[in-house]
Amino acid sequence: MGCVGIPENVQPVDNFNLKKYLGKWYEIARLDHSFERGLTRVTAEYSLRDDGGVRVLNRGYAAEENTWKEAEGKAYFVQGSDQGYLKVSFFGPFYGSYIVFGLDHKNYQYSLVCGPNKSYLWILARSPIMKEDIKHTLIEKAAASGFDTSKLIFVDHGKSMLRE
């Protein structure tokens, strides 16, 4: 169940290596959604599940409430495990697409991810700070694929990330 399609003009990356993708990623930018609204210092952590899937742990800081919010989900490849095309679920049997369509294939230091339609977009990196030229290239790629990059929210990671 759910929306596991691929938006028009989006192509999942090939030669995807899940082992290299696992670990912690920092959200650099995103399109706004109710489930992340107001959150800063957002991270996503990916690890292997016993059933062969991927455990997804999203975490962000809600400054207004002075609390951390977490959501744990699970993801599975839709086609082959060498393609950056997964389905992810945080709510029971309902799945949504998780499509990696931009990736640092060499070092796995940044990725460009979307959901089942053009209202879901994330720029992720292994560090809370991304070089401006790389960020610009990923934003251009997203814009060329039809995403409204003028609505991107750039995530504040603050100095506190250094103390975690």
Image (cartoon, rainbow, N blue to C red):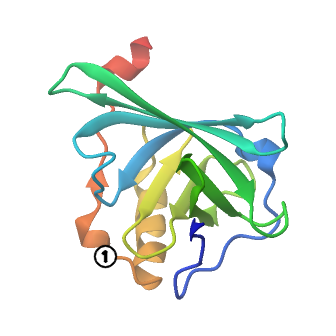
Residue 89 picture location, percent across and down: 58, 51
Q: Residue at x 77, y 35 (%)?
A: 49
Q: Is residue 47 above or below residue 21?
A: above
Q: In the shown orientation, is residue 10 left or right of residue 59? A: right
Query: Which residue occupies 57% across, 80% down?
Result: 10
Q: Quadrant of residue 25?
A: top right
Is residue 127 visible in this depiction of the protein? Answer: no
Amino acid type at image mark 1: Asp
Position above or below: 156 against 134: above
Q: Is residue 114 left or right of residue 98?
A: left
Between 100 and 125, the one nearer to me in the picture: 100
Residue 143, given in percent of the width and then of the height, sits at: 39, 78
Residue 13 is left or right of residue 93, and the answer is right
Which residue appears farthest toward the bottom when viewing the image? 8
**Which residue is pictured at 59% across the width and 78% down the height?**
6
In the picture, the quarter occupied by the C terminus is: top left
- Binning the other alpha carbons within 10 Å of mark 1 as few (below 14), some (14 to 19) or many (20 upward) gives some
Residue that mark 1 sits on: 148
Q: Position of residue 141 (x, y in %)?
A: 48, 75
Query: Height in image: 128 above or below 53?
Result: above
Place of residue 9 in the rendered image (x, y in percent of width and height, measured from the top left):
54, 87
- Left or right of 82: which side holds 129? left
Residue nearer the viewer, 68 or 150: 68
Q: Is any part of residue 28 visible from this angle? A: yes
What residue do we see at 41% from left, 11% from top?
Answer: 163
